Amino acid sequence: MNRIAFATWTLVLFAVAFTQVSVAFTFPNNELESVAVAASGDVWAVGTSSGTSTARGLIEHWDSVSWKVIPSANPGAAIYGFHGVAVASSNDVWAVGYSQASAGAPFQTLIERWNGSAWSVVSSPNRSANISSLFAVTVISSTNVWTVGYSGDQNTVTYQTLVEHWNGNQWQIVASPNSGISTMLTGVSGTSANDIWAAGWFTQARGNRTQLTEHWNGSAWSVVAGVNRGGSEARRGILALASNNAWSTGPNLTEQWNGSSWSLVMTPSVYNILTGLTANSASDIWAVGREYINTSNTYITLVERWNGSQWSIVTSPSPGVGFNALYGGAVASPNDVWAVGTFADSSGNEQTLAEHWNGSNWSVVPTP
């Protein structure tokens, strides 16, 4: 059930209250950050719909004919949004993100669950902090689900990792290590109860981000040294395929775990930011993100494919004006792959973006 990319994210922090509603609606800016597949005609994508000082969680579903907005459960919050989604079955889907009860209140974790007919809020713990948020979720089984993010002080930009676990009855915080003065986890993926990876970054006093990878061995989380290249991109993807085969993303590179260490695997694009990973097999892996075109100062979508020996760029459409980005991907079959993100329209507003691979090419599929 775990052939999905980590949930990428865009941190949305607003501070205004407005009337609660129970129906789905959209604001000028809309993006999809994560996608997960239950079956070929049963695909979920989550993100955020926002305005200057408003935000609502956005959930969309593909039913093999079209994408439709599915109302989320309003958590009784002024502001809320989703960063990650994962599927246990067609009747058991998880979405994670953040919520703010009212203007000036702390941002807290938000977890919702689909039971086959409706989304509902599932209580999740929070530390004593002015911000806590969850960015990615992975399903090992219906009674073993993990989500990662961060908590801390948004005023001083000092954060610590936040890891939570679902045991079939409740969500609980599980201790996780930190590095530097600020640490955040943005991706999670696992192959078994004893083999789960999380990816993120940490900052030292100088403020530069350094890539971070952590591993769960069934009893504790620990930091596992990687290539440790720096970069300004806050999103990182992680994909676990086997105990001796995992992948992570970073600016202009990917890393591969061989069972004992991480090694650098270069990608063909010079100015790439890869943020999502998904796979059909160990020799058929997709990475999605965006590429900076310095001659025009624009971003286009970027899709790369691993064939077992090297990465190559696969052409993908960029419908936006100046900015296009793919944040997450999910595989239903070799000829049925999805990627989601956002693009800028002619007014400069960001709109939802879903692209599909049919075995021969990528194409844009309209989204509400």
Image: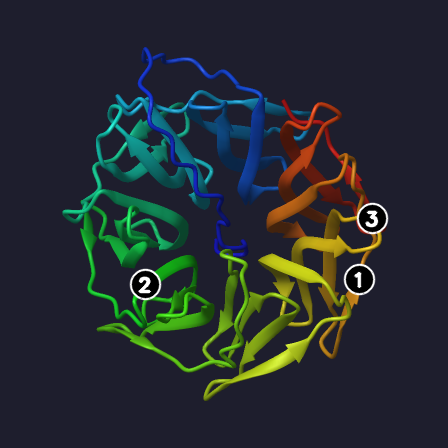
Quick one: SS at disc 1?
strand
C-alpha gap between disc 3 and disc 1:
20 Å
Amino acid carrying label 3: it is Ser
The answer to whether residue 53 shows anywhere in this view is yes
Residue with the mark numbered 3: 296
Find residue 326 and name its label.
Answer: none
Amino acid carrying label 2: it is Ser
Q: Residue at x 63, y 31 (%)?
A: 350
Where 220 sits versus 114, above or below? below
Asked if labels 1 and 2 touch by Cβ distance under 8 angstroms, the answer is no
Q: Measuring from the top left, give residue 96's x and y in whole percent.
A: 37, 41
Asked if labels 2 and 3 touch by Cβ distance under 8 angstroms, the answer is no
Q: Nearest the camera: 179 or 244?
A: 179
Where 366 sits versus 162, above or below? above
Q: Residue at x 23, y 48 (%)?
A: 168
Residue 324: quadrant of the picture: top right
Amino acid carrying label 1: it is Ile
On the rendered image, what quadrant is the C terminus found in? Answer: top right
Name which of mark 3 and mark 1 comes first in the sequence: 3
Q: Is residue 269 left or right of residue 75?
A: right
Where 340 sits versus 176, above or below? above
Quick one: SS at disc 3?
loop
Quick one: SS at disc 2?
strand
C-alpha gap between disc 2 and disc 1:
34 Å
The answer to whether residue 147 shows anywhere in this view is no
Find residue 182 and name its label.
Answer: 2
Name which of mark 2 and mark 1 comes first in the sequence: 2
C-alpha gap between disc 3 and disc 2:
34 Å
Residue with the mark numbered 1: 313
Q: Measuring from the top left, give residue 86's x and y in whole percent.
A: 45, 46
Asked if labels 1 and 3 touch by Cβ distance under 8 angstroms, the answer is no
